[in-house]
């Protein structure tokens, strides 16, 4: 059993060689291209294309439309009853925020269609705008 353990151990020389190889690749010297693997049926693998994003189209995400926010004390929260009005920080007619998994992606306005509320998107937030908002 001890012989098997000695054969599978990685020596410090192996680590040093691996680190040196990585340093050579990081310095811009010629790096070996990854080998192409063949599938079990012997054909070459398919190249990645934009159609591969079809794999994620059925993943559910949390879509939230935020009307506004406020902070209240627990005392005032416990006093809320049917018909109570809670003042929010948003003004009437102001665009509402549309968030996907907690990230702002758009703004819009409320619409009513067949007695159901919806939102009409009026502004889509670009990735560069999201980054700029994070810096502020």
Image: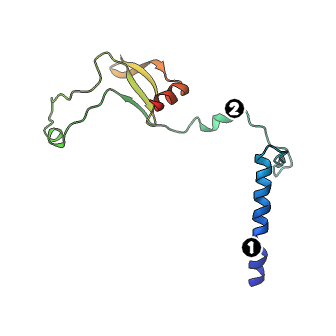
Q: Residue at x 15, y 36 (%)?
A: 80
Q: How is the image coloured?
A: rainbow
Disc 1, SS: loop
* Foreground of the two, 67 or 14: 14
Q: Position of residue 58 (x, y in %)?
A: 56, 37
Q: Position of residue 67 (x, y in %)?
A: 32, 26
Relative to 90, residue 57 above or below = below
Is residue 96 visible in the rendered image? The answer is yes
Please count the marks in the image: 2
Q: Quadrant of residue 102?
A: top left
Q: Quadrant of the C terminus?
A: top left
Quadrant in the picture for residue 44: top right
Q: Residue at x 77, y 59 (%)?
A: 18
Answer with left or right where residue 56 lies relative to residue 19: left
Residue at 47%, 18% in the rendered image: 123
Q: Is residue 53 above or below residue 15?
A: above
Q: For mark 2, what is the residue?
A: 51
What x and y, as percent, mark residue 12? Answer: 75, 69
Q: Does label 2 or label 1 sit earlier along the sequence?
A: 1
The residue to which callout 1 is attached is: 9
Would residue 1 be seen by someone viewing this image from the given angle?
A: no
Q: Position of residue 106 (x, y in %)?
A: 46, 24
Q: Nearer the viewer, mark 2 or mark 1?
A: 1
Q: For this view, does 81 lie left or right of residue 103?
A: left
């Amino acid at each position: 059993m001890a012989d098997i353990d000695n054969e599978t151990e990685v020596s410090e020389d192996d680590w040093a060689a691996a680190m040196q190889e990585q340093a050579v690749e990081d310095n811009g010297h010629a790096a070996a291209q990854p080998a192409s693997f063949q599938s079990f049926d012997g054909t070459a693998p398919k190249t990645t294309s934009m159609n591969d994003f079809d794999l994620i189209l059925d993943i559910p995400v949390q879509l939230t439309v935020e009307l506004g926010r406020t902070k209240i004390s627990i005392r005032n929260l416990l006093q809320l009853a049917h018909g109570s009005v809670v003042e929010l920080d948003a003004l009437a007619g102001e665009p509402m925020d549309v968030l996907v998994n907690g990230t702002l992606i758009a703004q819009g306005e409320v619409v009513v269609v067949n007695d159901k509320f919806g939102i009409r998107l009026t502004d889509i937030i670009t990735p560069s705008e999201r980054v700029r908002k994070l810096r502020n």
